[in-house]
Every structure is written in C-alpha cells, then in structure tokens.
Image (spheres, rainbow, N blue to C red):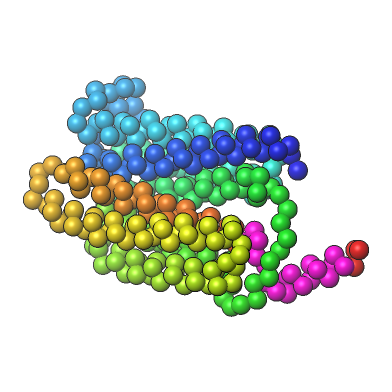
Amino acid sequence: MPEISKIRAVHRLAVLTASTTVLLLVAGALVTSNAAADSVPDWPLAYGRIIPPLIGGIRYEFAHRVVAGLVAVLTVVTAVAISRAGLRKAAFRAGWIAVGLVLVQALLGGIRVVFHHPALVATAHATLAQIFFLTVVGLALFTSPWWQSEHPALEDSASPRVSTLATWTTVVILVQLVLGAGFRHGAFGILPHLAGAAAVTFMVVWTGRAAKSRFRSIPEIRRAVVWLHATLGTQILLGFAAYWAVAASRESSQPMLLYVLITVAHVVVGALTLASSVLLTLVCHRLLRPATAVAANSSAQSVRA
C-alpha cells in the first residue's frame, strides 16, 4: 500500500477534478437554458480568437469552453498522479478511462459547433457528460484512504442483493438523465422523461429500503442511502418547478432568470443524484459479498491459520 500522504494528495486532486466537473455541468446547463449553444460558430477558436467579445450568449458558451479545458487538464494530471502513486487497479483504470472520455467529449463539442445536428449531437454530448461525471466521482472514491484500506467482507444473503439493486438504480438514473437531456434539446417529448422519473423513484425507494433493513449499522452504506434519498427528493421538487418554469416562459422572447435558475439546478441535482447512486453502488461492491463467497473466504483463512 502506498504512503498515506501520497494517497491523500492524489485523493484531494481527484476530488478537485470531480468538483470542477460539477461547475462544468453548471456551465453547460447555462448554455442550454440561455439558448446560447449556437452563439459561437467556430471551434476550437471563438470567432477566430482565443478570447472572443464577451457579449450576449457568447459569454456562456465561452465560459463553458474555459471550464471544460480546466477539467481536461485536471483529469490528465489526476491520471498521471495515480499512475505515479501506485494505487489499486480500480483507480488506475478509472483515471485513464476519464482521460479518454474527456477527449471524446471535447470532440463531440467540436462536432456540435461545426456540423450542427443540434438535437442528436447535443443529447450525445450531455449523455457523455454524465458518464464522465460518474467516472470522476468513482475516481474520487477509488483514490480515498478508505478504498485503499482493507475491509472485511460482509454477507448479503438476501435476494436481490443490495449491490445488484444499487447497480440497476444507477443505470436507471443514467437513462433518466439521457431522457431529460433529449427533452431539453428537443430530441423527443416529455412523456419518456416522466416515465423515467417514476422508474427512478421506484428503484431508489426499493434499494434504500433493502440497504437500510440489512445494513443499517454500516455507516458508509447508511450515509450513501441518505445522500441518495436527499438528492432524489430535491430533484423531484425541482422537476415540478422546472415544468412550471418551462410553461411560464413559453411566451417570453428571452429566457427568464427564474427559468434559468430552476432548469440549471434541475440538471445539476440530477447529476448529484447519479453521483449518490454511484457512491452507494461502489461502496456496496467494496463491502458486500454473497453468503457463499464470505463462507469460502472464511474457510480459506481457517485453512491458512
């Protein structure tokens, strides 16, 4: 195991990368909510300049590009730091997967500007943003001293296992965010998004009840469930508010400030709901094992003793 000081340093860098990615999600949501996606017609420069005139929608699009560049640099630096620190393989793999994702995301952003196809490419761009975010959230956990330490395996003999439920909950939330992105960018209507919201609520409640009934005494699992319930509850309230804001702004020639604030918050809290589910999933996979696996491990340890 590497020195604890190295682990903490890399962990802080990974947390900084994940936190900056939240800012990038805010910047991207501001572009969409302010209808500023077509404000800059060229890429990677902006109106042939490094810094364009910061007026109108250009300022939102340019801010998005600046934060994206910062996230890209931090991602590469984090991956290199993990490689040099010699952390567990999960951290190494996630670090370089994140590098690949951020490069593809930059390419998609360029395609959106140069070749247009706004609904399709913008939805793909928003989807990949969520996949990148869940990757760097996982990276922050993988580089933590807690993950790098050894933990005894806990038995989960019920069916379905909590780790399985948490995994499917994460998948359902990701699909729901894709449906939300498609609705925001005009790829399809709101009905698939509403159906997805119902599925997410069902899965979160089911997973939370199973986790709390079986592993209430495990603080890492209990905290992850609390965060998942809190973010989902906030997201549901923001969903109603966002629907009202969209309806109220239909007659406005320019996006209202309240509309922008609510829709941006809805996008960001959706991403935080995904992050909470990812953390619960990873914690469960780290701590929980099927009853047969725990028994086999105990027998092997007894034989070695």
Q: Quadrant of residue 85?
A: top right
| Coordinates of residue 24 in the picture (x, y in percent) | 39, 39
Residue in the picture at 19% in, 42% down = 257
| Coordinates of residue 276 in the picture (x, y in percent) | 48, 55
Does residue 301 lie above or below 116 as drawn?
Answer: below
* Magenta span: chief secondary structure: helix
Residue in the picture at 26% in, 53% down = 184
Does residue 7 appear to the left or right of 198 in the view shown? Answer: right
Picture mark count: 0
Does residue 113 appear to the left or right of 77 in the view shown? Answer: left
Q: State whether residue 217 appears in this view.
A: yes
Q: Nearer the viewer, residue 112 or 215?
A: 215
Q: Nearer the viewer, residue 94 or 141?
A: 141
Q: Quadrant of the C terminus?
A: bottom right
Does residue 164 lie above or below 267 as drawn?
Answer: below
**Residue 110 covered by magenta stretch:** no
Q: Residue furthest front?
A: 217
**Residue 288 covered by magenta stretch:** yes
Residue segment shown in magenta: 285-302
Residue in the picture at 37% in, 43% down = 25
Q: Quadrant of the N terminus?
A: top right
Q: Quadrant of residue 154?
A: bottom right
Q: State whether residue 164 appears in this view.
A: no
Q: Residue furthest bottom?
A: 159
| Coordinates of residue 284 in the picture (x, y in percent) | 60, 62
Residue in the picture at 26% in, 50% down = 263
Q: Nearer the viewer, residue 265 or 82?
A: 265
| Coordinates of residue 220 in the picture (x, y in percent) | 58, 57
Does residue 161 appear to the left or right of 179 in the view shown? Answer: right
